[in-house]
Image (cartoon, grey):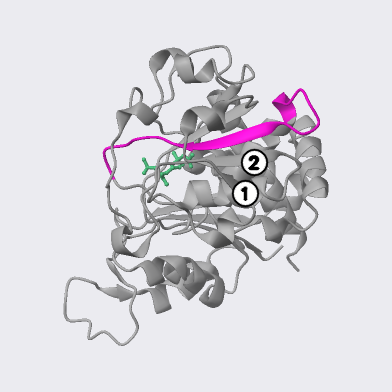
Amino acid sequence: MKVFTNVKDLGDLNAALKEAFEIKKNRFGYKQLGTNKTVMLVFFNSSLRTRLSSQKAAMNLGMNTIVLDVNQGAWRLETERGVVMDGDKSEHLLEAIPVMGCYCDVIGVRSFARFENKQDDYTEKILNQFIRYSNRPVFSMEGATTHPLQAFADLITIEEYKTKARPKVVLTWAPHPRALPQAVPNSFADFMNEADVEFVITHPEGYELAPQFVRGARIEYHQDKAFEGADFIYAKNWSPFRDDIYGKVVNRDMSWTVDSRKMALTNDAFFMHCLPVRRNMIVTDDVIESPKSIVIPEAANREISCQTILKRMLESLS
Ligand code: AN0
Ligand code: CP
């Protein structure tokens, strides 16, 4: 595997899940693969889970890890070609990326949507430069439009907790004070559309996600109706994709917060969220603390999704 940015990069999804569960049972069984190999984790944005789970996954495989927080200690990077660099940026990505590639075998990149220019975000301007110029396999640790390590971990978690062959999975928008990217819901939809689940998305009008991720999923604008009979509730805030309101907060309707009244409409559903979560905005304390909340095992599976990707990337070296 040379690139991991979306579900298609996994090939056969059932085979990928099988591999993930084998790794979970025997996470130190592949230590030889990573001996004398180095992964570089490049963060343009904050992280708790991705940072820690990726390092743990690399350790399990016997790899060394270098972490670079671009905004802390590195030179400020210019990302636009053709700019006269007479401002505050000392180095260009076009040199920085191949230099980073010299010191490692695999690269992970976190680079969120900037919401300055929709086209720049949706063409993955930063991540694609790493893919093009690093000369190394590159995996997304949340790009501008996708967060595939999260969605793969989410799918692993749903496989573990489901009690029927084809569960109903509902992705619900919920309010948040700041404009958040669409990467998590995009990837969740990307994966759920390929998985054997009944997939429903619910959100206020104006919050429609990009069609290439929604594909054939059912959209239900009435949140209560969407929750009926659900086996999994996956909550997430995102900002609008629509051109005229792209990346803006246009709705903070607290009636969309996931609470126990709404959970009572479901088929005793499990509650999921990628974290970090704002309590009593996205979800009430009692729901996230309930026995049906699986946010912690979901986060634990981030180690497994990342280890599966790193293992495949190591196997593709040489
Ligand atoms: C980010 C997001 O919504 O994309 C990261 C989630 C994994 N969340 C925040 O910035 C709060
Ligand atoms: N879920 C997730 O990616 O969390 P972090 O932003 O803390 O890495």
The amino acid type, in three-letter code, at marker 1 is: Ala
Left or right: residue 110 versus residue 171 is left
Does residue 263 sit above or below 3 in this rendering? Answer: above
Image coordinates for residue 310, horizontal then vertical, percent:
67, 52
Q: Which residue is mark 2?
A: 199
Q: Identify the element where label 2 is drawn.
A: strand
Does residue 241 sit above or below 271 in this rendering? Answer: below
Q: Identify the element where label 1 is drawn.
A: loop
Q: Would you identify the image quadrant in which residue 256 lies?
A: top left
Q: Is mark 1 within 8 Å of ligand 1?
A: no
- Which region of the structure is painted magenta? 160-178
Q: Are marks 1 and 2 in contact (CB under 8 Å)?
A: yes
Q: Is residue 287 visible?
A: yes
State the residue in front, 212 or 308: 212
Q: Which residue is mark 1?
A: 217
Residue at image position (51%, 71%) is: 128
Please tell me which of labels 1 and 2 falls first in the chain. Answer: 2
Residue at image position (70%, 24%) is: 161
Q: Is residue 278 visible?
A: no
Sort mark 1 into few (<14), some (14-19) or many (20+) by Cα contacts within 10 Å.
Answer: some
State the residue in front, 13 or 222: 222
Quadrant location of the C terminus in the rendered image? bottom right
Left or right: residue 207 versus residue 60 is left
Q: Would you identify the image quadrant in which residue 156 lies?
A: top right
Q: Is residue 173 magenta?
A: yes
**Alpha carbon distance from label 1 to label 2:** 6 Å
